[in-house]
Image (cartoon, helix red, strand yellow):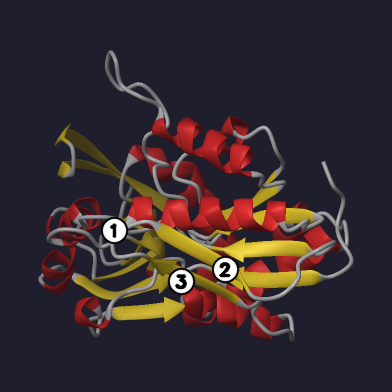
Amino acid sequence: MNFHGKGIKIFAGNSNPTVAKHIADALKMPLGKVDVKTFSDGEISVSLNESVRGSDCFIVQSTCNPVNQNLMELLIMIDAMKRASAARITAVIPYFGYARQDRKAKARDPISAKLVADLITTAGADRVLTMDLHAPQIQGFFNIPVDHLVGGRLLASFLKNKVKNYTDEYIVVSPDLGSVTRVRAFASKLSLPIAIIDKRRQRANVSEVMNIIGDVKNKNVILVDDMIDTAGTLCNAASAVIEKGGANEVLACATHAVLSGPAIERIKNSSIKELFLLDTIPIPKEKFINKFNVLSVASLFAEAIERIYEDVPVSSMFN
C-alpha cells in the first residue's frame, strides 16, 4: 500500500458536492477538476481534467439515494485515479449505504455491507474515511485502513451551550436498546443522565414503543440516533416520552438524514420541537421543514484529511 503522495487533492462525486466544496474550502484548496456524467443508457462516465500522478487523492461521495448510482460513481472514480497513477486514494464516505445489511438476519440472506466493502477495496481504494457507521464492526469488513469519525461530537458541541446552565432540566434518551452505547457517550459530553426506550420491531421499518427505562417526568428530552430513515423509531419515542413519561419537550439529534417514505410527514406531526442533523446526506428543498437545524461536517472531515495526510492519529480528535 502507498504512503501519502506529494499533495492533497479533493474530488467530489454527484451525491454531496456541497459538503465536498466545504471540505476543500476548510483546507484552503480548490476542488479537483472531474466530470462525472451519466450516458443516456444509464452508464456512468468519469473524466479527470487534471493530473493526479503522485497525489494523495480524497474522493468525497456519500452512498445515499440513489444508492447504487452513487456507489458506482465512487467505484469508477477510484478506478480512474488508480489508472492515472495517484499515489494514494481515500474514499471519503460521509454516509455509508448498505450499512444495515451487516449480518444474516435469516437463512440465505446476503451480507451486502461486506460486498460493498470488497468492491471499494477491489476498485483500488487505499483507505476509507467515514462517519457513524450503523454497525461499527463494518470497519472489519475492509482489508484496508478505516478511519471512523463520530458525528456526536459536533452535535454535542452545538447543544452544550443550550444545556450547560440547565443540566438538571435535560436528559438524553436512547430511542432503542441498540443506540445505548452511542447515547451514553453523547450524554457524557453534556454531563447529562440517560434513559432508554425499550421497543419491539414487528417488521422492517415498523416499530412499537414498549417501556421507558428511567425517569423523564418534567424533563426536556434529547433523543439521539445515528440515522433517521422512515422516522418511525424517533417519532414513536418522542410520543412515548411525552405521553407515557410526562416529559416537557423533545429535541432530537441524528447524524444521517435518510428521510425515506413517510418520514417528513411523521416528523411534522410529531412531538419533536427541533431536530438537529448533520449534512452527510443532502436534504432536498422539498423535504426541508422548519424543525430541521442542519450542521456541517466539513470541518471534522477536513481535520481528519489533514491528519491522514500528515500521518497523525485521527483517534486523538475524540479524546
Precedes in sequence: disc 3 or disc 2 = 3
Q: Nearer the viewer, residue 36 or 167?
A: 36
Q: Nearer the viewer, residue 317 or 17?
A: 17
Give coordinates of residue 113: x percent, y percent: 45, 36
Q: Are marks 3 and 2 in contact (CB under 8 Å)?
A: no
Question: Which amino acid, mark 3?
Answer: Asn
Give coordinates of residue 259: x percent, y percent: 25, 62
Label 1: which secondary element? loop
Distance in Å between CA atoms under marks 3 and 2:
18 Å
Q: Nearer the viewer, mark 3 or mark 1?
A: 1
Q: Is residue 289 left or right of residue 13?
A: left
Q: Nearer the viewer, mark 3 or mark 2?
A: 2
Question: Which amino acid, mark 2?
Answer: Ser
| Residue at x 31% of width, y 66% of height | 219
Q: Quadrant of the C terminus?
A: bottom right
Q: Quadrant of the N terminus?
A: top right
Residue for badge 3: 16
* 112 to 27, vertically: above or below: above
Distance in Å between CA atoms under marks 3 and 1:
23 Å
Question: Which amino acid, mark 1?
Answer: Asp
